[in-house]
Image (tube, grey):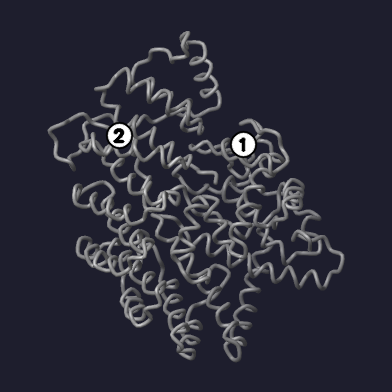
């Protein structure tokens, strides 16, 4: 995973390069190369099942008499200036720290604010150990400074990001127990639950989320806490215990997007455990609710879950009608999944599915000329070596960097596939590289090779489920593995419904792109049959 800044989705700077023999004989397939405009549109928030990191958590206060939910008077998290976000700033911080270290290796004496600034520079470049050194120095040298809670949170959060959950847990526990009057303290209290979840202790995580709800009824993460209780109990195999929390959430957030999300959580629960009568009534109620941007589903997805429930309950004719009622097109993932289910049902349903596919193919052909294929040599070499589809790589590349090889995110991700230094070091051996420097990640050949190595491993973990691969690229394969289990059913549309639980992730982009990829791949296969010997975009094709 190459986590990004919580801008989360790349802005999509569009490099326009000329077409080449990379697409020779495959005009119809060109669309696949970058029709996945937002194929990787899942954000670092995925790595924190409803740990909403859209608001900076590293804030602190030392006001002991304030109630737990009182606003903080402490300074905000240190925000780096544009100058401090450069590689030059990182190099300068390292040079200064090295020159000023004492005989025993301790850091130079800085003000609390300077320790926070340097820690932020290192954190932004995923130089986590160097960041923690400054936070620890601040805590040791200035134990009553208002920045101490934020420093503790930084230590715990970076351990969490490195998936060192056993080490992160006591940090968050101490933070949550000691600094409950500070936003960073409340965040630490909340992150105990998120950490327990990743330690495969969903029951304990649910209890911690419930304790957060009780202690901080107006806490910064209160809506997420309610919703996470439901899903944590599901993961603990306690769906019956989750149902009352659906109703409590609806009551607490009546008339809001959170209420709608709670009803959606109930629908996913019903589908997962095969309670089809409840799934019908829940989907009917949900279909009449408002689908604002803050809602984690769509009318089309709800319709798909209802049609799936009809099919699994043995109501084939009603299921066919329901699937046919979900509009298909190059921009509709749920429509594509409905078409796939119709094909599997056979007979007249299959004929209807083929007609839908023909209409979508026309959309693909019309869009084909809009998608160039840059860095073709780098992509083809890496894809061949690692045995993955180069179109998938290009789709990730477009979304992550807009084909800008010098792109750098606020979370330290670099280059075309936005790889972070720590992930590059992990996957360099698989790519046949002895080592990869931070500067190497700005080189297209190196970046594409290392990123493709990671994608290759993800495809081994989640064969035949590109949705899970795309989700893992941003959210982490450990999280995605849990969501696959939670979905129960092997249908990709049911799996992607579980992904919608991750905050404000724009999964529709991922879904639409997956649909386009599927449709254009079929066009590619037909073109290949007609043009024997044409260069192929599919490895081994």
Depicted 234 relative to depicted 422: above or below: below
Q: Mark 2: few, some, or many residues within 10 Å (few <14, many ≥20)? A: many
Depicted 288 relative to depicted 162: above or below: below
Q: Nearer the viewer, residue 8 or 479?
A: 479
User: CA gap, disc 2 to disc 1?
Assistant: 31 Å
Secondary structure found at label 1: helix
Depicted 126 relative to depicted 303: above or below: above
Comes first in the chain, label 2 or label 1:
2
Report the disc number at residue 59: 2
Report the disc number at residue 425: 1
Secondary structure found at label 2: loop
Q: Quadrant of the C terminus?
A: bottom right
In this rendering, the label closer to the viewer, 2 or 1: 1
Q: Residue at left 52%, top 20%?
A: 94
Q: Residue at left 60%, top 82%?
A: 343
Residue extending furthest toward the left: 65
Q: Residue at left 87%, top 65%?
A: 533
């Amino acid at each position: 995973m190459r986590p990004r800044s919580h801008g989360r989705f790349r802005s999509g700077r569009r490099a326009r390069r000329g077409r080449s023999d990379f697409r020779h004989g495959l005009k119809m397939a060109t669309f696949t190369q970058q029709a996945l405009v937002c194929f990787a549109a899942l954000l670092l928030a995925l790595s924190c099942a409803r740990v909403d990191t859209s608001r900076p958590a590293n804030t602190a206060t030392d006001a002991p008499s304030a109630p737990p939910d009182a606003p903080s008077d402490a300074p905000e998290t240190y925000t780096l200036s544009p100058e401090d976000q450069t590689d030059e700033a990182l190099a300068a911080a390292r040079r200064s720290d090295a020159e000023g270290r004492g005989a025993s290796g301790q850091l130079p004496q800085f003000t609390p604010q300077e320790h926070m600034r340097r820690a932020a520079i290192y954190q932004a470049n995923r130089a986590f150990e160097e960041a923690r050194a400054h936070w620890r120095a601040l805590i040791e040298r200035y134990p009553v400074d208002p920045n101490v809670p934020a420093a503790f949170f930084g230590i715990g959060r970076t351990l969490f990001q490195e998936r060192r959950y056993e080490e992160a847990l006591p940090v968050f526990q101490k933070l949550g127990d000691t600094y409950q009057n500070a936003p960073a303290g409340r965040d630490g209290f909340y992150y105990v639950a998120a950490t327990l979840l990743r330690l495969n202790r969903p029951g304990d995580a649910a209890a911690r989320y419930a304790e957060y709800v009780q202690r901080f009824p107006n806490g910064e993460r209160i809506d997420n806490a309610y919703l996470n209780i439901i899903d944590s109990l599901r993961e603990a195999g306690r769906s019956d215990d989750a149902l009352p929390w659906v109703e409590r959430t609806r009551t607490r957030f009546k008339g809001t997007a959170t209420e709608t999300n709670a009803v959606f959580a109930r629908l996913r629960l019903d589908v997962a455990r095969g309670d089809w009568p409840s799934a019908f009534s829940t989907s009917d109620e949900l279909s009449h609710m408002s689908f604002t941007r803050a809602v984690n589903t769509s009318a089309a997805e709800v319709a798909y879950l209802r049609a799936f429930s009809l099919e699994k309950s043995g109501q084939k004719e009603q299921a066919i009608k329901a699937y046919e009622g979900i509009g298909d097109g190059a921009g509709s993932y749920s429509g594509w999944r409905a078409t796939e289910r119709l094909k599997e049902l056979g007979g007249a349903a299959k004929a209807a599915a083929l007609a839908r596919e023909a209409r979508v193919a026309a959309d693909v052909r019309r869009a084909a000329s809009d998608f160039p294929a840059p860095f073709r040599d780098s992509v083809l070499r890496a894809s061949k070596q690692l045995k993955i589809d180069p179109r998938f790589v290009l789709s990730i590349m477009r979304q992550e960097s807009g084909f800008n090889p010098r792109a750098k995110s606020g979370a330290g991700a670099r280059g075309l596939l936005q790889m972070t230094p720590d992930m590059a070091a992990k996957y360099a051996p698989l790519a046949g590289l002895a080592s990869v420097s931070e500067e190497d990640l700005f080189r297209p050949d190196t970046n594409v090779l290392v990123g493709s190595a990671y994608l290759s491993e993800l495809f081994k973990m989640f064969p035949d489920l590109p949705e899970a691969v795309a989700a893992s690229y941003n959210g982490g394969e450990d999280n995605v593995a849990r969501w696959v289990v939670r979905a129960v059913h092997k249908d990709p549309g049911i799996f992607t419904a579980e992904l919608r639980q991750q905050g404000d992730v724009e999964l529709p982009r991922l879904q639409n792109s997956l649909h386009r990829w599927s449709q254009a791949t079929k066009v590619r296969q037909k073109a290949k049959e007609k043009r024997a010997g044409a260069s192929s975009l599919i490895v081994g094709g």
